[in-house]
Image (cartoon, rainbow, N blue to C red):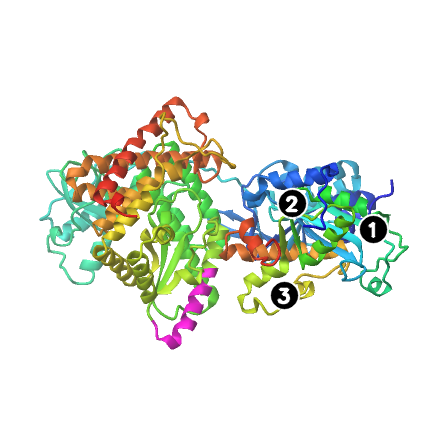
Amino acid sequence: MASMKNTIAERILDFLKNYPPFNLIPKETLLEVAKNVEINYFEKDQIIFSQNDTPHEHLYMVYEGVIRLYRFAEGKKHIVDICDEGDLFGLRPLIMKENYLMGASANEESIVYGIPINLFNDIILNIPKVSQFLIASFATNTRDPFSEKHKGKLFANIKAIKKVENTFIETQSAKYTKNPITCNPKTTIQEAAIRMTTNVINSIVIAVDKIPLGIITDKDIRTKIGTGIFKITDPVELIMVSPVITFPENITVAEAQIARLKHKVSHLCITKDGTNNSELVGILTEHDLNLIQGNNPLLLIKEIKCAKDAETLKYIRSKAAELTKGYIEQEIPIYFVTKVISEINTAITKAAIELSIKEIGKKPPVEYSWLAVGSQGRKEQLLMTDQDNALVFENVEDSEYDGVKAYFLKLATKVTEKLNIVGFEYCPANIMASNPKWCLSKREWKHQFKEWIKDPIPEKILLSIIFYDFELIYGNKELYNQVAKSVLKLIKKNQIFLSFLGKVTLDNPPPLGFFKQFLVEQDGENKDNFDIKSRAIRPLVDAARIFSLYHGLQINNTIARYKKMMEVEPQNKDLFESCSNAFKILLTFRTSQGLANNDSGKFVDINSLSKADRLKLKSCFNPIKNVQEAIKIRFKTTQIG
Amino acid sequence: MLGLFKRKNFPKYWQDYIDKVSNSEKYSNYENIRFVVLDTETTGFDYENDRMLCIGAVAIQNNKILVTDSFEVYIKQEVFNKETVKIHGIRKNGDEIKISEEEALIQFIEYLDDAVIVAHHTAFDLNMINTALKRINLGPIISKQLDTNYIYKKLSPNNRYNKVFSLDDLCRRFNITMHDRHTASGDALLTAFVFLKLTNQYKKNNALNIQDLVKTNYHLNS
């Protein structure tokens, strides 16, 4: 049969045949290759594959544009090679059947051919010239060993590459220094400093009967003595930092790191029962923690701060994902896990903003705050989910408005692009600061909330609901506080809004059907799956929000909201506590499901659950029912519409 | 629908096509959608009197152009217009293997399957294909249809209503090197590049789903 014309494949062949090793392949074979090419388009900085990814089914050849290959080693990014027109990359892992040893991303807008590896393997086997070429390339580590022209490296220098071990030490108990040196409050500063010097330590705990009262560190000697504020003959109690931050003996590395993040201290005291009224047994220093190698949140946050581009941020975020997995496996309390991951996500967003400002080359014209809304605003994001963000900037004169807004839209577009590279998908509902609707001045935001709150029709509530969980990520805190306070004030004056909000949130059907069966999806891709996000987690999030707004609390995190409510409404302590516990269980469940299936964890295949897990899930449903009942009564939702 | 005589028994390939499009479950998940980017070369611009000489198409799925899933046929026609030969270069007795219009349509319909059609100035190509289908008492095409001209307009609100963008305009705008311009397959590939670049822009500020994309195309699909 006469073969049909294939214009596209012929054009691809015309390109391939100019470059090694395709110039060594007979035309008929090459046409077969050309017919099976996949053509990929990559935006500037878009990642093609990341270091340690499992290999794709294609090797790549640059048709137009430039691809950079890079590798992270010892905490630094190294550019391994720059590939341009006609260069091959991503070949070695396919032949060696191993994960990518380096990442590849588009240095500029690029079009890249993907060549199926199975076809290529046949060619290697059947055409000796091609295998000779590849062997020579491997051996000499050059792109084209047969030519002087191509000096680039085809394969990374294997000797320079060692695989980094990933172990989860942060889930182990932290190793602290036992029997720390102490002194009493009346000891002179000089005497304390002499003791620190003889013992080569950078801190000393001030204790009475082994109960720790305070601590002095090298820093206190520098800032309080060196500056002449106190004399060396003064007693240590005048300069000690008090009270000390204390923890029980079984503190994990993770907890210690979080505590240091939270309290911004370099030393933690370990006491018998973990309070500062019990006997001191040890001290945990920054140094003790830094001795521990591997992925730890503090180190990751430090790396994030130093990152110079989005692909480095992505690499660090992938380490954070491993961390989450380790935490969940080790059953570290979910509250801690969300805290660590939120800190990391926040640091990544900050870095993305700073990098973007640098790229624009012009500082923001007025004060602004970058806000996270929805689950990121509540600091409950554990898996990689969609971006939800917004921006508020200081009020400006009408004449300046357009220019100022244009700056922030440009900034936000760059930031959302970077976050997308890191792995946060664009928000499908377009709730992003790059959308002119959600990049507003303070006055406009106040006006927007007023419109939502004073005219609470269901459509507006559904659209606006995620904006009631908004958290400052970067920028001016005062600006953020002003908007947040005005929202709470508005709600206080318009309590009927809460009834409408309650009604809308109660529209989420309860998780169990009449026969106490899980309600599963009726059709579509997720048929017969249980939507744990919408049916179980969201009702608890919604309930926490409405009570929190009712009490005018400026808190976004669901667990923190329930905790505060237990204080504010002691008569309902049990209800809120049960909600908080159910929420923790469900969030842990969703996260482990998501990690296992490498998705958002939104849907659970009920049939794949063990009986114990099913019971555990069902046990979370009573609090949902109870709190929904409470909303109905408190906010009189049945009396409206 | 007076002109369209509904036969009880469609040929199997047509009935299969109708069933596949009607029952497809791919449209809800963008990554699963197969797009067929197509272009036709014709003897002119008159739907009734001019004829298709070539249909070229290439598929896109999950942001990749799949060369292995491409389509190219040349059609035997009695109608001939030496003016347009200068543009597309398809001579009356050229050396391409040519098949009958009906055979070309059968092959195309089978290739099309439940894909979403993408073209530049889609209305023109679809009108040509539908007129040809009508000659064999079939049609019209029921596939969802997108037009790169309209997606571009949606993304550049300043120019929304008053300008029509040619494929050349968009290739220049998006920095796409033009090879094989004015061959059906060549133009289909260029349109595919334009589509990939457009959807990449589009998804930054819009949900990338087929319902919303179809809405950009306000005079087709209505």
Which secondary structure dominates the residues rendered in magenta?
Answer: helix
Residue B156 found in image quarter: bottom right
- What's the residue type where badge 2 is placed? Ala
Over which residues does the magenta segment extend?
A396-413
- Between residue A117 and residue A166, name the one nearer to us: A117
Labels 3 and 2 within one chain: yes
Q: Is residue A410 magenta?
A: yes
In the rendered image, residue A85, in percent from the top left (x then y), is placed at: 69, 56
Q: How far apart are marks 3 and 2 (CA)?
A: 27 Å
Q: Name the residue under label 3.
A: B173
**Tag nearer the camera, 3 or 1:** 1
Q: Mark 3 lies on which chain?
A: B
Q: Does the magenta stretch include residue A253?
A: no
Q: Name the residue under label 1.
A: B75
Q: In this view, does A104 lie above or below A127?
A: below
Residue A284 badge? none
Q: Which residue is drawn at 32% across and 60% down?
A: A451
- Between residue A436 and residue B157, name the one nearer to us: B157
Q: Dividing the image into 4 quarters, which one contains the C terminus of chain B?
A: bottom right
> Residue B85, can we see it?
yes
- Packing grade of label 3 (10 A; few <14, some 14-19, many >=20) is few
Q: Mark 2 points at which residue?
A: B115
In the rendered image, residue B61, in percent from the top left (x then y), is placed at: 63, 46
